[in-house]
Image (cartoon, grey):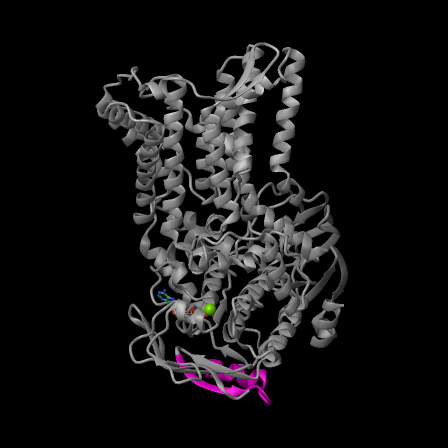
Amino acid sequence: MRRLHLGTEGVLALIILGLGVVLSLTTENFLTVQNLFDLLNNQSVNMIFAAGLVVVLIAGGIDISFAVAASVVQYVVMTLLISIGGGNWLFGIALSMAIGTLLGLFNALLIYRFRIVSIIVTIATFNLYFGLLMVFTGGVSIYDVPDWLYYAVPLIDLPATRGSATLYLPVAVMAVISLATGFILTRTGFGRAIYGFGSSPEAARRSGVRVGLIHAFAYGWLGMCAGVAGLMQAHIVQEVVPNALIGQELPILAAVVLGGATLGGGRGSVTGALLGVLLLAVVQNGLNLLGVTPYAFRMIVGFIILAAITCSNLDKLLPQRAMAREARS
Amino acid sequence: MGDIALRADHVSKVFGHSRVLDDVSFELRRGEVLCLAGENGCGKSTLIKILNGVHAPEAGAVFSFGDDTAIGHITPREARARGIHVIWQDLALFAHLSVAENIVFDDYVANPMRPLSYRAARQQAREVIERLGVQLDPDTRVEELSIARRQLVAIARVLRAGARIIFMDEPTASLTRNEVRTLLDLTRALSAQGISIVFVSHRLAEVLAVCQRVTVLRNGKLVGTYPTEGMTQARLSQLMTGQELNLVPRQTAPSGEPVLELRGLSRRGEFEDVSLTLNRGEILGLTGLLGAGRTELAHVVFGMTQPTAGEMRMHGKRLTLRSNRDAIRHGIAYVSEDRLNLGLVQSQSINMNTAVTVLGELEKPRGFLAPWRVRALTAEWIRRLGTKVSDAELAVSSLSGGNQQRVVIAKWLATKPEVLILDCPTVGVDIGAKAGIFEIIRQLADDGMAIILISDEAGEIWMNADRVIVLREGRVSQELTPADTTEESLEEIINA
Ligand SMILES: Nc1ncnc2c1ncn2[C@@H]1O[C@H](COP(=O)(O)OP(=O)(O)OP(=O)(O)O)[C@@H](O)[C@H]1O
Ligand SMILES: [Mg+2]
């Protein structure tokens, strides 16, 4: 068991690499810097979501409202920015973070105050946010985004076989958020207390862990990540479409679960979550290249989530088996 | 020795309409091991919770700590600050975190923002583990440890937090013989370091072996505090129950025709080639150290797992059990070892928990569930088992540990099975109730039920079984009759 746990991230990296090799055999030039950069550019939004979601999963909760929350943030931020005449990157990001955090805190409040299961709360807020968004926007998209948001911001430019390989701003934002999340989770007592709370809420409560604070942080942090992800997505596609992000929540959940988080809480890591996103992306890419219908991807996502639920139940049996083994030895 | 570590006077507690503690005084000296003894539901756990600030006592209580402070109640934070800690029965550990992280977890709570070092955590964990004098790898995840080792982690954790007083509520209930011995040694070692320990156990032999004094409660009232020197188990149980118990070995009844036969039954990795016959009206003791395959064998007979070789026969006909439903249909019932987790729905009422196995029966003949029939059934079992219940409509979680166990036993007895497997039925049950439970078991056998009694308490097997099968490492190592041996030699055989 131990060996397996230690290796979740390593195993994922190996699988991604293996798939890369296989795909480069079937389609030429898959393993190139250019493709790697493209993958990161394309997946940075999902990875920001994943870095936030893994915190909630570790705390033993679940959230499916974050993608819709990101859409709400996009719309609100863009409307505000346009009304004040444009703004800039710093202001845009700060505003997105603030509104995203508020939406996340609303989930935390409901979960903590009224002791409702997180999945129920976030199904409700998913519908609430989506409904509000559609009612207020009438489903109309925003196309004239501010200039600073409109133009891509290249960060790293490497010469490559065909033209050049470029990394853009969203990748850097993703890196900063992931590092910050990882630091909090593994390098502060508060982060370890989140693991502890997810592992055994009752034990954490008795140890004096402030449960409300853990909830507020987990959902607030995911909300903040979602806000930033929303802004980045608007930046990449250069428009705000109210329902553009809907449906992203489950593949991201599946990715985070692939990365070693469980629905039971207490487990998972940012690295794992990011690798999970990449793995799913490579799989999806591979399916496209092989000409398989896109619905096959949804099938895989569904399968992963099912497997995760089954495993988190299996998990409850495992310690007992381990104990029986130890007792006998 | 001699000076006071913790003193509480006039402690009372009322839950709803029942007065659970009534003007109890409690005194703990520095460096002593004190036992809290009393029947199930007499208020031991409640007293511990009050002394740790989990519950507030009624007005009038006075706490003091060997200095000049005297306060009316104590908050959890204050208890921690004064070095008062509890090893809860569920241990309150974090299964997914490593041993080291569990040990330093209180730092995480106290200084959430301080950047942390795993190396320092590991180092500090090693230090306390060393101080405990046990073997524990700081990097193992707690979920991979046995209960006994988890308990060591919990003890290490409170030591690290600067514990000067440690309460342990039934720490030995889920341990094997050897593990109990280790824990008792550890307890003595800690008290030699000047740490005061309050110990709760229903196994009186342990109590007398490890404690210097014993505080006895009965029905929420203090009976008194006595030195264990010169105290006997009989005297102690008399203090606890207020009456004299005379335990007599079971008079072996002539056994009837075979009900259940196992032929060369094996399950790979668990037990091998077990053959035995269980007769009508017989109590068959199945014993051996934990891990000898007792529980695993019971799981196969109850259809929860499948044998890999051999066969079972019931009334001479071959018996194949695909699931425990099959087993229940064939009249086999199993009171599991892990009753608190597997046996009860904690949030449901005592009534529903008792009736759940026989709902189908209770609905006959009209096809609806009459609440009064459920209540009558529960009332009957509460009476027969002597369960201490104030209102059977309350959730099972409101009962004391020992009384919850009686509810599980009642629930299976209600199915009137032909074959009843009892897996350590008296763990955590007080001495008076133990006698009560065995009286019922004997009565059931006399009425024709075939009973398999799994236990590692040589005493109760010797007193109650007609025949004993000793398992060792998954094989039958001996079969004997209690009448032909003494309790002591049976004890030796089990632990050999
Ligand atoms: N929260 C509660 N609400 C109502 N009644 C309670 C509550 N907690 C305990 N009780 C009752 O108080 C009494 C004392 O319980 P307590 O748990 O202290 O017993 P105990 O001496 O520890 O017994 P055991 O040996 O069985 O563990 C019991 O009758 C129990 O039902
Ligand atoms: Mg108790």
Assess whether residue A284 is covered by the magenta stretch.
Answer: no
Along the viewing direction, whichever of B188 and B70 lies nearer the viewer: B70
* Residue drawn where x is 37% and y is 24% of the image: A246
Q: Position of residue B463 (x, y in %)?
A: 63, 73
In which image quadrant can residue B42 be found?
bottom left
In which image quadrant can residue B326 be found?
top right
User: Is residue B408 shown above or below B192?
Assistant: above
Image side of residue A183 versus residue A150, left or right: right
* Residue drawn where x is 47% and y is 40% of the image: A180
Examine the rendering and report whether any part of residue B62 can be seen.
Answer: no
Q: Position of residue B229 (x, y in %)?
A: 59, 88
Along the viewing direction, whichever of A115 and A189 lies nearer the viewer: A189
The residue segment tinted magenta is: B221-242
* Residue drawn where x is 44% and y is 21% of the image: A153
Q: Position of residue B320 (x, y in %)?
A: 64, 42
Along the viewing direction, whichever of B327 and B219 lies nearer the viewer: B219
Assess whether residue B237 is covered by the magenta stretch.
Answer: yes
**Which quadrant of the figure contains the N terminus of chain B?**
bottom right
In which image quadrant can residue A232 be found?
top left
Examine the rendering and report whether any part of residue A171 can be seen.
Answer: yes
* Residue drawn where x is 60% and y is 61% of the image: B124
Along the viewing direction, whichever of A5 and B368 lies nearer the viewer: A5
Q: Position of residue B422 (x, y in %)?
A: 58, 60
User: Is residue B189 shown above or below B282?
Assistant: below
